Amino acid sequence: MTLRTERASSTLARSRISRWAIIGLFLLPAFALYAVFVLVPVAQAVVFSFYKWNGLGPMTNFVGLANFQRALSDPIFQMAATHNAIIIVLSLVIQIPFALGVALMLNRRFRGRAVFRLLFFVPYVIAEVIAGVVWRLLLQPGGLVDGLMTAVGAGDLYAPWLADPDTVLWALFVIISWKYFGFHMILMLAGLQGIPHELEEAAAIDGATRRQTLRYVTLPLLGPTIRVSVFLSIIGAIQLFDLVWVTTGGGPVDASNTMATYLVNWGFERFQLGYGSAIAVILFAVALTVGLGYQRFVLRRDIDGALTGGAG
Amino acid sequence: MATETTAVIPAEATSARIGSLVSWIVRWGVLVIVALAIAIPVAYTAIAGFKDNYQITVDPIGLPNPWIVSNYTDILGSPSFWRQVLNSIVIATMTAVVVVAFAALAAFVFARRAFRGREVTFTFFTLGLFFPSAVAILPLFVLIRSLGLLDNPIGIALPQAAFALPLTIIILRPFFRSIPIELEDAASIDGCGSFGFFWRVLLPLSWPALATVTILAIVSSWNQFLLPLIMLSDKENWTLPLGVTNFSTQYSTDTALVLAYTTLSLVPALVFYVIAERKLIGGLTSGAVKG
């Protein structure tokens, strides 16, 4: 009797060990990859940021918070961060509502709908750098835009927008919207298709006009999708790099630098890895604060709404 | 009284008809303008690639006259273009294989095994969504250099796969969870262990989800710019995005040739999109809408 329980408990222990071993083995590859190439480098960036280091030789010149002080007091970095903020605001005020409007137009059945949907998403699969090169060529003097405007008699209004510090951010924003509005539209279409038709029909039967149905039924139910869209748009704008790098390189005279182009500029073009890392840490802090804050305070409501049945 | 009502109804009906006509015109107007704005830049690039530089200067918006194919044939005949295509394919394939294999293993236990700390570990992986790769780029450069993997496709593929892990796991987990427990019981009665079930039952049943995440991984690898820019200095190892950027600055005076090069580098992504459109869009929306 005692023998049997002992044996039973030892097989139980063995099976528990093997269960943990299996879980460990399944998780190990992903964990190792993630740790080596994501977690450790991010942690190292924090360490680098306290040193003055050119990337070669031992890292010995500890400078404390000097790199951060230097970055935060550099007007060019302040401008770069402002540019990220401007792109975020423009995206939220213009691009997202525009994508929503187009999604609403495409949310009814009509001939040709599938073609529009397919077409609007095309720029999303084009690499940001290639989109950048295409638009650089389009917008250059003698390019298509110049040619079209001259042809319709508006040639005087043409300007090389990407080369003008006052307009370069707007030009970049147009390219960003060209590339990404289709992605947001697709997200919102998917969200719209998740809304049961009965609700909109019920509103119509209760005498709601189309506008009222949109305002009080469709948009609140689409809330979670819009919030995800807003979130992705913000996170994307914080990291903006490829497009700017190939179209303007951050110029003219730093008028289109973003935090990421500033980082690569100092980190790789001038090999100040310590200073570059301080920029990386700032960028990371901003992304993480925005990300977690948004998840905590905005996306959280979606879960509550779903559980309590209230409108989001 | 009766005449009044009959008089009112047609008036209302016409105003409703006018209203719906206006909304029809607005809808089609907006959609067509947007469609043109999307299509014209790409179409212009492709068509202007058939011009020579003289034609582009003289008439930037007209059709080529005559159509010149030499820009395209020159590029298609140059080994460096094909070299870049091949490099992009190699890196995208390696990235996709690594990320899908590793993420599938992890998503399996996240989906189908109850263990202490599971949700914490899972959240820990999903946090990676907030880590812009630019943050890690300087230490990654130092790491890849010390591993001797600069100018090596592996040095691009592994970091890319690592950064793609969170999204891939997030998409695979609910799919793996939806496979009925009875199948696993049956497999275990037939003597299948955890790995046997994973390999012989779960993966074959999950091919739609696996296809989706593979496509997402390929597309994002194909379009990567920052990592290759930092890690690849030898021309021989350049990927297509690097090649296009460098070509466009190197031959900036030969606009026609740059346009043709850009067009050709667009083609693989477009073909891929047309083939895999449904999976790609389905994957992105499931990741984001449920995410």
Image (tube, coloured by chain):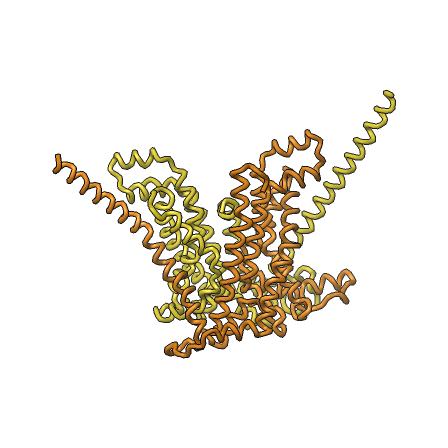
x 67%, y 70%: residue? A164
| Residue A236 shown left or right of residue A138 in the figure | left
* Numbered circles on residues, count: 0
Of residues B99 and A126, the one nearer the viewer is B99
Residue B124 image point, x, y percent: 41, 53
| Residue B108 shown left or right of residue B23 in the figure | left
Query: Can the viewer see residue A142 in this picture?
Result: no
x 32%, y 37%: residue? B184
Quadrant where the N terminus of chain B lies?
top right
Residue A123 image point, x, y percent: 58, 55
Query: Can the viewer see residue B207 in this picture?
Result: yes
Q: Can you say whether A128 is above or below A214 in the image?
A: below
Residue A13 image point, x, y percent: 21, 44
Of all residues shown, which one is farthest toward the front? A2
Of residues A37 and A66, the one nearer the viewer is A66
x 29%, y 43%: residue? B194
Of residues A281 and A309, the one nearer the viewer is A309
Q: Can you say whether A221 is above or below A174 in the image?
A: above
> The chain drawn orange is chain what?
A
Residue A33 image point, x, y percent: 36, 58
> The chain drawn yellow is chain what?
B
Q: Can you say whether A66 is above or below A14 in the image?
A: below
Task: Give residue A196's quadrant in the image.
Answer: top right
